[in-house]
Image: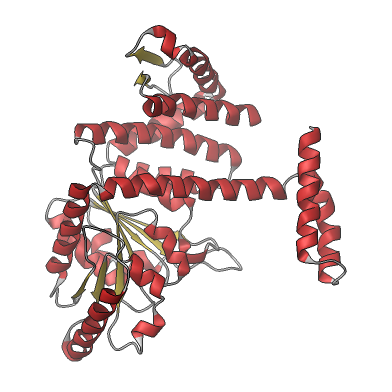
Amino acid sequence: MRQFSLALLRHISSSTAPALTGTCRLHSWHCFTASRPQYRSIVPPHSCQHTRTESTAASQHIQDLSGPEQRLLNKLYDGLIGGQRASLAECITLVETQHPRKKELAQVLLQRVLAYRREQESRNGGKPVAFRVGLSGPPGAGKSSFIEVVGKMLTGRGHKVAVLAVDPSSCTTGGSLMGDKTRMTELSRDMNAFIRPSPTSGTLGGVTRTTNEAIVLCEGAGYDIVLVETVGVGQSEFAVADMVDMFVLLIPPAGGDELQGIKRGIIERAELVVVTKSDGDLVVPARRIQAEYTSALKLLRRQSKSWNPKVVRASSQTFEGIPEVWAKMEAYRETALASGELQGRRTAQQKVWMWSLIQESVLCHFQNHPGVREALPHLEERVTKGAISPGLAADLLLRAFSSSSSSQ
């Protein structure tokens, strides 16, 4: 498995390095066939000598896939690109798995989907083909109802909408009620919509690495609008802001002192604030909240040089304000594309998630290191008894990790 991981890393490097250096590029990538990947040089051969070694590594990587694995990945990829919802669901299940081998297969699949998406973007003038929107708000804000109404409106206009809804999971069993899909009854039956409820699995805010990868898969399946609904409001919501093009905050009226209840950092990250449930007796409170947030946003630092955050009211029950909300979202997208901020934002997000995954992988590697596992129980016991400080215990564990690693 270690050889497979190293081969995969070399193969990824071979497919991404040409794009970074501009000296050579991948002509065709048939990752799931027994044939050797072909490279086409656009400069003299001497400047691309490194591709020979990389091509050999890629061939070795292909050999590491068994026949059934190649057929499985071919089937999933073909179904995904063909827009089959069942295949998309299987692909997301594959990237969510914790099985070591399946996680490696998921990365192979993702690399091919990313290559396909790059081709689509190049045909679109280098602009993203999908619009990613993150939706957050306190419990009871009506996020699911809002998503269903907006989703039905968009599918009626010819869009394909994917909803990645995260449900709180039990810390005891790890399961969740998956209530979002049961609340979006109309949208879940729409053939141009795809709803994927996922448990938080103990992750604060419910946003994990698989959420980011699921977005890529949804885009590969042809969904041009991806809505990501997250759990609650808190500092963890910065995670979803780092994977979407637009962050929308939903606020219910008559919920108390809203400006005190919502953290300032979240308001600063929001490109649009929607006051929900603006109907009936709640119209007056909704107008008051809209005025308060409009005033508050003027005092906060702007995140974008080309866009001023807006505050609007909407009702999922009466449909009032829903078209206006989408119009604001479209206006933001056009403004961000024209200024280049959207493309720059996506580029920065990739770096953020790369380092986030590095931290996660390094911590896992550290915890599973033989030297650390041997010293950990004794040091934990001494820390709990107050014999040594947590800082000293951490230094000793790091020393055990580095000394064992350097001697190997």
189 with respect to 153 (left or right): right
Up/down of 50 relative to 195, above or below: above
Up/down of 168 relative to 342, above or below: below
Q: Nearer the viewer, residue 368 or 345?
A: 345
Question: Residue 101: image x %, image y %?
Answer: 58, 37
Report the residue that reaches farthest toward the top. Answer: 45
User: Which of the 4 image quarters holds residue 139?
Assistant: bottom left
Q: Nearer the viewer, residue 80 or 25?
A: 25
Question: Residue 383: image x %, image y %?
Answer: 82, 67
Q: Residue at x 21, y 57 (%)?
A: 306
Question: Residue 32: image x %, image y %?
Answer: 43, 24
Q: Nearer the viewer, residue 139 or 186?
A: 139
Q: Residue at x 42, y 72 (%)?
A: 232
8 with respect to 408 (left or right): left
Whether residue 142 is visible, yes or no, is no
Where's the C terminus, which quadrant?
A: top right
Q: Colour scheme of this structure image?
A: secondary structure
Where's the N terminus, which quadrant?
A: top right
Q: Residue at x 42, y 65 (%)?
A: 237
Question: Residue 298: image x %, image y %?
Answer: 25, 75
301 with respect to 204 (left or right): left
Q: Nearer the viewer, residue 175 or 51?
A: 51
Up/down of 381 relative to 45, above or below: below
Whether residue 352 is visible, yes or no, is yes
Q: Please give the count of numbered marks on the rendered protein.
A: 0
